[in-house]
Image (cartoon, rainbow, N blue to C red):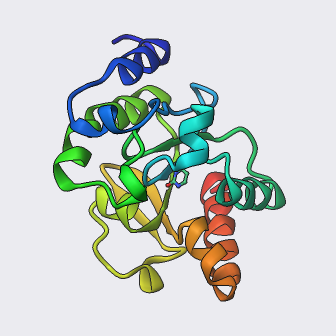
Amino acid sequence: MNCLEDLVREVILCKKCDLWSMGTRAVPGVGPANSPIMIVGEAPGANEEEAGRPFVGRGGKLLRNTLTKFGIKNPYITNVVKHRPPKNRKPKKEEITMCSEFLEYEINAVNPRVILALGRTAIEYFGIMSRLSEANGKVFVVKGRKVIACYHPAAVLRNINLTDEFNRAIEQAKIALTV
Ligand code: URA
C-alpha cells in the first residue's frame, strides 16, 4: 500500500477475518487525505454497509450536524473495524486486531493533529480504559497524538440526556485543533 486509494482497494478485498462473508460490503474511511482531524467509530451499521460509507445513518447525521455546529470541516471519518458485525454486535478482539493494520495505515497516512474516538470500542483501541462517563471530552496523548474520547452518537440517540456531554467533547476537539 502506498496511498489511501490502495487502502480502499485492500479493505474491499480483505478476507482476513470472517466478517467479510457475513455482509454485503466493506466500508473504508472517507475524507481528505490531509485532514487535521480523524473521527474513529466502532464498525459500520446496516446503512453504512448499504452505502459503503461510514456514518450515513441517524447517528451519522447527528455527528455531522454537531461537527458543523462547532466549525469542524472536512474530517476524515473511519471505523475501528471496516465490515459490519452480524446484528451490529461489538467487534471481537481478534477482528479488531486483524483490522488494525488498516486503521494504523490511515492514521499514519492522514497524520491528523486530533483524533476523536467515538464510543467504547474506539477509546479502548487507543488504550483509554476509563468509563466514557469519565473520559468523555478529555484529551489523551497517545503515541504523541491528541485523542479525545467522546460518547458514540448512537448512545446519544438512545439517551438524549447525553447531548450536552457529546457537544462538550466535540467542542474540545475543536479547541484541540486550534491550540
Ligand atoms: N456506528 C459506527 O461506529 N460507525 C459507523 O460508521 C456507523 C455507525
Residue 149, image x, y percentages: 47, 67
- Extreme-left residue of the structure: 94
Q: How many marks?
A: 0
Of residue 14 and residue 103, the one placed in the foreground of this image is 14
Height in image: 61 above or below 164?
above
**Residue 19 visible in image:** yes
Q: Position of residue 21 (x, y in %)?
A: 31, 32
Q: Quadrant of the N terminus?
A: top left
Q: Residue at x 61, y 45 (%)?
A: 47
Residue 48 is situated, as x and y percent measured from the top left of the image, at 58, 42
Q: Which residue is painted at 75% across and 43% down in the image?
A: 73
Q: Is residue 126 visible?
A: no
| Residue at the extreme bottom of the image, as rendered | 161
Q: Nearer the viewer, residue 49 or 129?
A: 49
User: Does 148 sit above or below residue 107?
Assistant: below
- Horizontal side of 178 relative to 130 (left or right) equals right
Q: Is residue 82 above or below residue 25?
A: below
Residue drawn at (35%, 29%), measured in percent from left and top?
Answer: 105
Q: Position of residue 112 (x, y in %)?
A: 51, 40
Q: Is residue 84 above or below residue 139?
A: above
Image quarter in which the C terminus is found: bottom right
What residue do we see at 66% from left, 62% from top? 175
Relative side of 63 to 33, left or right: right
